[in-house]
Image (spheres, rainbow, N blue to C red):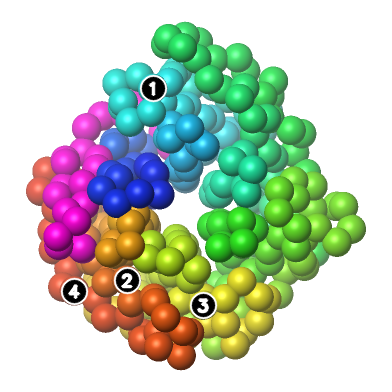
Amino acid sequence: MALTAETAANQAGAPLGVVGTNGPGDAFRAHLNPEAAHPGNAVFVPFTGFDTLHEFRSMATGVNVDGRVEVFAIDRIGQLWHRFQIVAGADSSFSPWAKFDSSAFVSVSVARNQNGALQVFASNASGQVFTRTQVLSSDTFPTPANPKPAVDTWTPWAALTNGWISQVAAATNSLGRIELFGLGIGGVLFQRQQLKPNATDPSTAGTWSEWAPVNHAPAHLREISVTTAPATGRALFLAGLTDSFQLFEAMKLTDTFSDADFTHWGQVPAGIRHIAVGNEAGSSGAVQMIGTNSAGSVLRNSVPDRVGGTIDAVVPTPPSTAWTTLPGRQLGVFTS
């Protein structure tokens, strides 16, 4: 089962898109439409069918510089596919699926560079992580049409070495640099980040940091999700789910590469089996946590955006509202 979320634009009122799969791997898409007067109480637009052919296992969504949503998905044999809106905001305009030259991937994430180019990160079953970057303006079509193969519009794959990583999650910080998080052996949380904006090839000296553990993070993590806190765009909000299905949340407050950047990891009562986070864009926004329980029901929990003023004024563990069940389709039944 896969679950991911994206914010369609960095402006108040922009919809929050959610894509998930059920047990067989069929994909569905839904939306949360924020209410400016009531941050955290976004109106849910139920899931509709998005794909029934590929049996997807991991998914990620990003937003192009022109506002078009792009979805990335790994199928049951590890092939990476993508499709994108041809008209920004119009889910009816998604292109056909195009396949990357790839195999044996198990996890995918995406973030947007300072120059607007999307950068994809994928890990394989051997713990290797690879990345490639969009060639700007190459995926734009005035009318619906079959896209060129994805390999024609993206840079070649480049390896992020010096670590064994089973799952990746990426987000862009306030300096326009991508920060990448990954789960190592035993569910240990690691991080690395661009040292220069728009760094596409990690093998180039001085462009990326090395993998380093995030001290004091929860142990034995099985899933990690990250997004930008919407009010200032300065802090990153992380949610981590452990092997025993305990959910924790924390914020990374600055753009530096230090354990001191992280708040205390606070536990969120949940009963959740899968987790994704996204933000309600705008100065009064909130972070939305979307999860599924053991019965496959989809739930959400909003976290008021408390980032503002000086770092000392930030509440260490953001308070969360109660989990509520979203109406409509279930996304799989889990026995683990």
The vertical placement of 25 against 290, above or below, is: above
Amino acid residing under circle 4: Thr
Q: Which residue is mark 3?
A: 253
Please report whichever mark, 3 or 4, sits nearer to the chain's N-terminal start: 3
Q: CA distance from mark 4 to mark 2?
A: 12 Å
**Residue holding disc 4:** 321
Please tell me whether residue 36 belongs to the stretch shown in magenta.
yes
Disc 3 from disc 2: Cα separation: 13 Å
SS category of the residue bearing label 2: loop
The furthest residue to the left:
327
Q: Quadrant of residue 211?
A: bottom right
Residue 298 pos. (x, y %): 21, 54
Q: Which residues are magenta?
A: 30-56
Question: Which amino acid is tagged 1?
Answer: Val
Instruction: Find the residue positioned furthest to the front.
Output: 309
Residue depicted at x 34% and y 54% = 281
Element carrying mark 1: loop
Percent x, y for residue 294?
A: 24, 61
Is tag 1's residue or tag 2's residue first in the polypeptide sequence?
Answer: 1
- Report the disc number at residue 305: 2
Q: Amino acid at mark 3?
A: Leu
Left or right of residue 216: residue 333: left
Give the SS element for disc 3: loop
Label number found at residue 87: 1
User: 204 or 173, which is in the foreground?
Assistant: 173
Q: Which of pointers 3 and 1 lies earlier in the amino acid sequence? A: 1
Q: What's the distance in space between the residues labelled 3 and 1, CA to CA?
A: 35 Å
Mark sitting earlier along the chain (1/4): 1
At label 2, counting other C-alpha atoms closer than 10 Å, the crowd grade (few under 14, some 14-19, many 20 or more) is many
Q: Is residue 250 above or below residue 282?
A: below
